[in-house]
Amino acid sequence: MRQRTTFFHHNDDGVEPADLKITSDSLSGPDLVAIREDKITLDLQELPGELRELLARSSELHLRWESPRRRDATELWPSRVTPGLHVFYTPRSDDKAETGHMCRTLRNTFGVMDCQTPKDSFTKLPKSEFKHSAAYHYYHPLSDLKHFGLYAGQYACGPSDSACAKKFASLDSATSFDFSYDASVDTVKASIMWPRGKQPLSLTAVPGHRLEVGIMTPDAPPYVGPDELGVAGLLVVLGEHQKPNPTLFAFPARHKASRVKFASRFLSPAGLHPSLQLKISSAKPPINDESCSMYAHLTLPRTIFGDRYQLQDDLFLASKNLTALRYMSEPVDLEAPDYVMKLWGSSILLELKPPQPTTDQPWTAEVPLHLRYLAPTPGGYQTISIPYPALFWACEAEQGIKFTNSPFDRPHVGYDSLFSAETLFWHIDPQPERTNLLTNDINVPVLNTEQATWVNAGTTLVVMLGFGWILWKLVWVAQRSGLSSKTPNELLAKKQQ
């Protein structure tokens, strides 16, 4: 196992090298106001047996989880996915996607209950068109990592190791979690991030394993390029360094932070065909490059969906400040109610149309969506939560840049596979206006089970009355025509004449 812990702080929140106490297996110092990331590289033998069995069936597996709580924007980790758990999966053979092993592992690890098999519950990604994408995608609106913390603690902590159990319990406050496996490398990389706040500067290396600690702040070396990010700080490898080593370096960064902010909400009244409004603080692109375009990537649970045909009308899109529908996952059933569907939902990539000429003034775009019929509930209403979309500028990078050289790159976030490998992303920071949660709620009217008895009785009565009225009309018509007074033999004799 190899571990890298990085503290990323503002320039005025640093720590003096003399205040750090370093031994062969530990580092300690004063508390530090920073964002913390723990990144761990594991061999397959170090994983639980259930997970090893799943990876043996997988060509690649990438999990991306984002908290619904808003986090501060940062230059080092600006990329985002919509809040919840995303699974990007490619089986070693397509028949393995028909088994439920993947969903059983998700249920045991994260408490996901509505997954059956990748064939049934996952959407299929266009692998033939985008060579660097996974084959299947699954989404679940997971609000925290509490269940995962309990699961991981059972395997990593001894029965009497309370400190270890407390560490895994702290996952409840994490802002993001990544897990990546690629069969070509045959190792697993996992990373966990905590929000900016007071971080205890106390780390101890696991015996026999490498621990690297970085205390970093943004900086720009003289040679930094337009597509690079520079950092400076202190670097310590426990067991190798007796004192912190000053460091200053730059690396290609495929994901960068834009100064633009956005908020989203459903226009009122929402009805059964709600419109998601995106309020964006500026239409000015991050760089003077005609290749830059703004996009919104929506992850929609199966309770709500977009209509492909509606989003292909150019005049309609222009009226909503949208340019085009660039991608929609398939299939999307336009008629099925929520409670009969097995598929998790759908994802949409829309190109937005900022006003021209571009200015720093706020502007809005609207995305038309449609609600599905939901299962009956007491009270007659259900509240559904829709995660914030991911908004970003996509620009062409300079030729020859290799973003894989970045030690802080975050690939496989869903929408990056819909662009070329040379695309540079400038992320727009979500900033809700009235809450700290990156979700929008809709109160949906449904059948009230408390009144369903009256509905059933009323329906039965109406059907019986209607049937009685039709029967009475048939008898009335028969009497008017004189048919009812004649016997069948008399009618037959009349016909033979």
Image: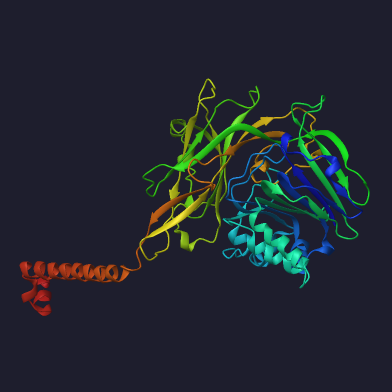
Quadrant location of the C terminus in the rendered image:
bottom left
Among the 4 quarters of the image, the one containing residue 376: bottom left
Among the 4 quarters of the image, the one containing residue 289: top right
Q: Is residue 461 left or right of residue 274?
A: left
Quick one: 30 or 320, which is closer to the camera? 30
Quick one: 30 or 318, which is closer to the camera? 30
Q: Residue at x 5, y 67 (%)?
A: 480
Residue 150 visible in the snapshot:
yes
Percent position of residue 443, x then y: 40, 53
Percent position of residue 337, x then y: 44, 59
Q: How is the image coloured?
A: rainbow
Residue 127 visible in the snapshot:
no
Percent position of residue 324, x then y: 53, 34
Quick one: 24 or 182, which is closer to the camera? 24
Q: Is residue 193 left or right of residue 297?
A: right
Quadrant location of the N terminus in the rendered image:
bottom right
Q: Is residue 376 left or right of residue 82?
A: left
